[in-house]
Structures are given as structure tokens and as C-alpha cells.
Image: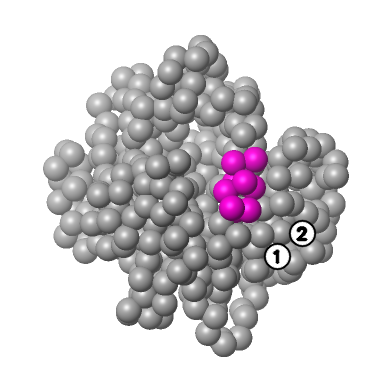
Amino acid sequence: MNVLILAGDTDGNVGDRAIVLSTCLALRRSDPNVRITLVSGRPEEDQAHFSAETIPRGWRGIAQLATAARRSDLVLCGGGGLFHDDASLVKMPYWAVRLAFVRLFARRLVGYSLGVGPLDWSVSRLCARLAFSCFDELSVRDEFAQALTQPLTSKPVQLVPDPAVLLPPAEDSVAARILATVGVPDDGSPVIGVAVRRWFHHHPTVIPHKYAVKYHLRRVRGQESCARMTSLLAEVLDRVREERKAHIVFLPTYGVSHEGDDRICEEVGRKMQTVRPCIARITEPRAYKAVSGRLSVLLGGRMHATIMAAAMGTPVVGLSYNLKFEGFFRLIDREDRVMAIEDFVRNRRVEDLSDLLVSGLREGRRIPHRLKELTETTRICTVRLLTGQDEPPVSIPRAAPSSQTELLKEKGGSILTKKALP
């Protein structure tokens, strides 16, 4: 079997690398002889890491992309947050054109555990319709994405939780060695993991943020709000550390220049009044997941840091910048453990976020039954979607709302999308 994967940004993004690696492993479990091809910005590195053939991203690889699509039994788009317009207005046109091109050559094209939304602009929703029309089958990773996607396609939109829940962690000894190396003592004290990001610079513009940063095309926005966020986070961590005598370790997941999670972590650390926290720069997804399993609680401002920690039984608290957080916390029945980052900064909710972290510490490490169900659901649906094996489809244990309108009402109105669907 030949499979071509069109994924997110695996260049320095531990979350997207976790999705691709988990998908590759799932394919190989179903067919040990599967031949996998990836589109990559770092072809040599990814060829070794994923044990797959690679195609250069962009115009350099366009002929190879057509050839790979033509020879593939399956072209897989996803998973992860690919279809949204909260950072760039060209994201959806890009994916629509790319998928329409691949559709010309592909025998079978599947949208797999996609993150969809927000799609606030009519041109984005139009391009989403075109992209969805290219798929033979389509699945999304949470109920909010499902509610937004279904009105844009006549196909049934299945719900398959994020494949990162299936990723096997590295050995515990690897995690212990990483934590010891960065200075986290194994003394029985609680360990609070923190995975945060810069967010307030994100505004929908024609020029994608990474190119604006690379070529200095505009002033980076939101610096004042971001500075306020790091100060408030430092206050939260100081408070919880003092109360619980905990160690703090930062776990950045996206280290490229236009994101720079490690720089945000350093900034929060500098503003803390207690001892300087540790920073673990982990680039290998299985090692990252193993480390997350040694935490007492994770404050997750990155989606896949949160998913991997929860899958390891670590209590998680979400600092949300997108409804995908609410979607995941809804799936694991912990909607009470997520807070919008804008709300946290605007209303200075230091005490509330501190209380959520302390509640997580009191809860202790365990894998909830609900998460076990979701993991098994993901495994079975993945086998069926990726290989076409005739396993019966598995439903998510709790039914999704019957319409986008109902789901929007739960979130207080026009949060999922600011404009009416065309």
C-alpha cells in the first residue's frame, strides 16, 4: 500500500510531528509493508525520523507531489488544525488549491481528524467547501469542528479524536533523564509543566505571520497584551509554587523564529519572583509525551502538549486561544478546566487560574475512563479510515449536538464563526 500524507508544519512543531508520527505508526501496524511519502520542509531530517520518503514543500516539489499522488492508494490530509483563518486569509485558498490539484491524480483522498475553524470570512468558507468536496471521506477531531464543517459539505462528517492520543511514549527512563538534565529534582515534590505560546499578534491578514516576520513586512502586533500575559502567568506560577512547594518546568513545543515558544517561556521565567524555573527543549514527540507523563499537572497553552499529557493520565488545565481547546476538553468531560487566554488577560484572572492548577494537583495522575474510550475510538476509526478495513464504525460515547446552532448557543452565540454561513 502506498500512502501520501499532507500534514501541518512539522518544521520545529512537536505537536504536528506527533500527529504525523502517530499516523505513520498506525499505518504500519495495519500494514507493515506500507510505503509512506510525506511533504516536508526538511526532507532529509523527516525521512530519517518518520522512516518515509519525502517531497520538498512548495514549487520545488510540485512534480513529485503529482507523481506521488498518482501512485498512492490513499492520500491523507491531516490531522491537526489546517483549516482556519484566524491568522491568515490565504490559508484556506492555499489548501483549497492544493487539494484540488492533488484530487486530479489521487485515487482516494481522505480528510483525517482535521481541526476546522474558525472560518470567519466568506472567502474562507467558500474555499473550505471546495476543499471538502475533494475528499472521499472526511473526519474532524472535535464537536465544534464537526458543527462548523457539516453545513459546508453534503458528506457525513465523522468525529475522530486527535491521533496524538495514540502515540506511544518513549521509555520512562528517557523522561527521567531529560528532567534531571534540565534541573528538575526527583524529590517527590509536585512538578508543574507549562506549555504556553505567544498569541496576541495573530490577526487575519493576507500575509502569513511567518513570512511577515521573516521578511520584516510589518510590525509585530499585540506586544503589550503579550507582555501582560507573561506577567500574569508569572504571578500564577509564583503563587502555586509557593503554596504547593512545586517545581516548574517549561515545555515549549514550537521553536521556529516566527513562533518562539521558548522565548515566551524564558520571559515568563524572568518575571517570576521565586526560583528560576527549568526549560526542557524537547523536539522528539515520544520523548515529549513521556515527560508529560511525569508531571503532576500541565498548564497547556498549546493543543498537543495538552493532548499528550492528558493521554498519559496527567491532569491538564487549558489556556485556550481557539475553540479546539474547548472541543478537546469537552471530549474528556473537563470543560471546567479550560480558560480563554483573552479572558485571563483582560480580567486578570490570576486567582481563578491558580485554583484550576491546584485542583489538578489535588486530583492526581490517572487516565479517566472517558479518555480510554476516546483512545480506543480513535484507534478503530483510524484503522477503518486509513486502510479501508471493514471494522464497524465506532461512535463517540456522548452524542454531539445535532446542529451548529445548538452548539453555538452553548457557547453564548457567535463564537464559532462571526458571520453567517453562506
Magenta-tinted stretch: 93-101
Q: Which mark is residue 144?
A: none
Q: CA distance from mark 2 to mark 1?
A: 8 Å
In-front residue for pair 101/238? 101
Q: Which residue is mark 2?
A: 153
User: Magenta stretch containing residue 94, yes or no?
Assistant: yes
Instruction: Find residue 152 and report its horizontal and vertical position in percent.
Output: 78, 54
Percent of width and height locating residue 9? 43, 44
Residue 221 sits in quarter: top right
Q: Nearer the viewer, residue 73 or 244?
A: 73
Side (left or right) of 124 relative to 31: right
Residue on which the image places disc 1: 157
Q: Nearer the viewer, residue 332 or 133?
A: 133
Q: Nearer the viewer, mark 2 or mark 1?
A: 2
The residue at the point 15 percent across, 45 percent down is 180
The answer to whether 6 is drawn above or below residue 42 in the figure is below
Is disc 2 surrounded by few (<14), some (14 to 19) or many (20+) residues within 10 Å? some
Q: Are marks 2 and 1 in contact (CB under 8 Å)?
A: yes
Where disc 1 sits, the SS reads strand
Q: Is residue 74 above or below residue 180?
A: below
Indicate the position of residue 168 as horizontal and vertical percent values: 33, 66
Quadrant of residue 207 within the rendered picture: top right
- Residue kind at label 2, given as amino acid type: Thr
Instruction: Provide the secondary structure element on which disc 2 rests.
Output: loop
x 35%, y 71%: residue: 35
Q: What secondary structure characterizes most of the magenta part?
A: helix
Horizontal and vertical percent for residue 21? 36, 60
Residue at position x 85%, y 44% in the image: 422
Q: Residues within 10 Å of mark 1 (few under 14, many from 20)?
A: many
Q: Amino acid at mark 1?
A: Val
